[in-house]
Amino acid sequence: MDVSQAVETRRSIRAFLPDAIDRTVIERVLEKAQRSPSGGNTQPWHAVVIAGEPLKRLVEETAKVIPEGTKAHAPEYNIYPPELDGAYAERRFGVGEAMYAALNIPREDKKGRLSRFMANFRAFDAPVLMLVHTPRYMGPPQWSDIGMWLQTVMLLLREEGLDSCAQEAWAIYQKQIRACVDIPEDHVFFCGLSIGKRDESDPINAFPVPRAPLSEAVRFEGF
């Protein structure tokens, strides 16, 4: 698989097969991803990769507090800017509606939508979950570096025939994560990355996710 194919076939997978993933494959991907760019070669990314019993425990502990609603939420950063509007807000709303439409869950089915949301905190039943964190003093440039590293990881996973879903949603339960996984207190928990093989039969992995035309994002000058 070349880079273009990896980019074309990568998408956020929200239904995984239960097939176990060999640790050596994950290690190979992460070893290659260490070549990701970072400002000043700081390499600010840190992660814990869990599977089996540690993942089961995290899912179980998180499930205990989900019924508490927002009272149990404790994100260390705003996952979306409070002032998100215009095309950015429309795209966020649109992808959610497209997902629920693919699953035939109408807006008035609050219970169905909540159940689907809760799947986030089972890592969409993926067999592997990577938990990403970074020192608290790191700024926006270093968070950007982490994004480049994550994209490199996701594309290398495609090369291995695997799939993933980057999940900032896990940030709302960082307290539960810290209770189950050793993440330094002087680090910010950033996101989870669910890893496994996509379930091709599940419609949640096939609905269209449109991208804005290049003209909306890029302007050329001097050509």
Image: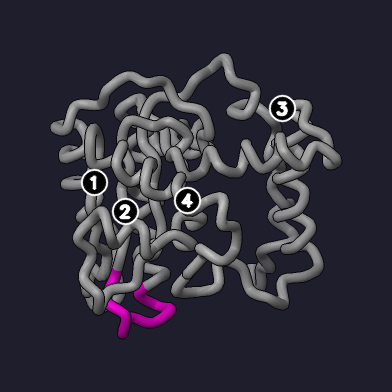
Q: Residue at 69%, 55% (x, y): give it.
A: 214
Query: Quick one: 170 or 89, which is closer to the camera?
Result: 170
Q: How crowded is mark 1: few (under 14 residues within 10 Å), some or many (20 or more)?
A: some
Q: In the shown orientation, is residue 30 left or right of residue 129?
A: left
Please name the residue that numbered disc 2 is placed on. Answer: 131
Q: Residue 139 versus residue 204: which sits nearer the camera?
A: 204
Instruction: Look at the numbered discs 2 and 1 and tell me whether their residues touch, using CB distance below 8 Å.
Output: yes
Residue 153 in the image: above or below residue 169: above
Q: In this view, does 14 lie above or below 96?
A: above
Start and end of the magenta stretch?
134-142
Residue where numbered disc 4 is placed: 167
Left or right of residue 86: residue 13: left
Disc 4 is placed on an element classified as strand
Q: Distance between the residues labelled 3 and 1?
A: 30 Å
Q: Position of residue 122 (x, y in %)?
A: 44, 38
Q: Do the residues labelled 4 and 2 touch (CB within 8 Å)?
A: no
Dividing the image into 4 quarters, which one contains the C terminus? bottom right
Q: Which of marks 3 and 4 is nearer the N terminus?
A: 3
Badge 4 density bin: few <14, some 14–19, many ≥20, Cα 10 Å = some
- Identify the mark nearer the N-term, 3 or 1: 1
C-beta proximity under 8 Å, tags 2 and 3 = no
Q: How far apart are marks 3 and 4 (CA)?
A: 20 Å
Which residue, given by chain and number where applicable, does mark 1 sit on?
Answer: 49
Q: Closer to the N terminus: mark 2 or mark 3?
A: 3
Q: Name the residue under label 3.
A: 103
Between marks 2 and 1, how big is the CA–CA gap? Answer: 6 Å
* Whole-number angstrom distance, CA of label 2 to CA of label 3: 28 Å
User: Which residue corresponds to the image point at 53% horizontal and 34% vertical from the top-left?
Assistant: 14
